[in-house]
Amino acid sequence: MADAPQDTPSNTPEAGTRQVNLQRIYCRDASLEAPLTPQVFNRQWTPKVDVQVGTNIDGLGDNIYQVTLSITVTAKLEADTAYLVEVHQAGIFQLVGFSDQAEAQAILGAYCPSVVFPFARETISDLIQRGGFPQLLLQPINFEALYAQHLESSKAEAGSAGATVN
C-alpha cells in the first residue's frame, strides 16, 4: 500500500497568512542589588514586594521587531531595601502578513510580551535565589489588559492635549 503524500512544514507563508515568528529570546540586562547583606538575613522575612513592568518595541527592519520586557522587583523590610532586581528580557519577532498597523501593534504590545514573560520570570527568580533570598514567583500578567489600558490612557492624553484653555 502506498503512503499518501505528507504536507511538509514550510517557513514560507501562503498568501494572506498571518504569522508571528519568534526568532530569538535573550536577556539584555540583569542586575541584583542587595544593599543590606549579610545583616538582612538575620531579620524576620516579611517583605513588601513592589513589581514594575514596562515594554519597549524597536523596529529592526523587514517586519522584524525587538520587544523588550523590563521588570523591576523591589523587596523592602519596613523602610530598608532587602533587594532590588531589574531584568530586561527581549525577544526578536517577525510579523508576516499583517496589513493592519493597529493589529500589528496589538500583537507587539500584548502577545509578544506574554511570550517573553516566562523567561523574565525565570531570570528574576534565579537571581533572587542566587542572592540567598527565598524564591519569588511572579504572578502571571495579563498583557492584553495592560495594552488596552495603554491605549485608553493614550486616547485620554490625546483628548486633553487637543483641548484649549481660555
Image (cartoon, helix red, strand yellow):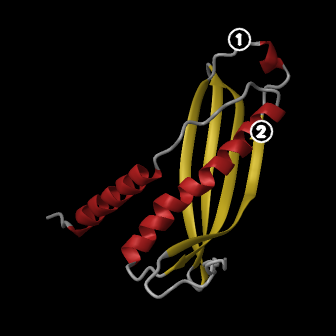
Q: Residue 123: which quarter of the image?
A: top right
Whether residue 163 sits left or right of residue 7 in the image: it is left
Residue 126 x %, y %: 77, 39
Residue sitting at the far left? 166
Identity, as a three-letter code, of the amino acid under mark 2: Asp
User: Callout 1: 10 Å neighbours few (<14), some, many (20+)?
Assistant: few
Residue at 64 percent across and 34 percent down: it is 74
Seen in the picture, residue 127 relative to 21 is either above or below; the reply is: above
Residue at 29 percent across and 63 percent down: it is 155
Number of marks drawn? 2
Quarter that holds the N terminus: bottom right
Q: Nearer the viewer, residue 150 or 6?
A: 6
Instruction: Provide the residue designation for mark 1.
Output: 44
Instruction: Provide the residue designation for mark 2.
Output: 126
Dot label at residue 134: none
Please tell me which of labels 2 and 1 falls first in the chain. 1
- Report helix, strand or loop for mark 2: helix
Q: Marks 2/1: CA distance?
A: 22 Å
Q: Nearer the viewer, residue 113 or 21?
A: 21
Residue 50 x %, y %: 57, 34
Q: Nearer the viewer, residue 109 or 152?
A: 109
Q: Residue 27: which quarter of the image?
A: bottom right
Identity, as a three-letter code, of the amino acid under mark 1: Gln
Seen in the picture, residue 154 relative to 75 is either above or below; the reply is: below
Q: Which-is-in-front pick, marks 2 and 1? A: 2
- Report helix, strand or loop for mark 1: loop
Residue sitting at the far front? 1
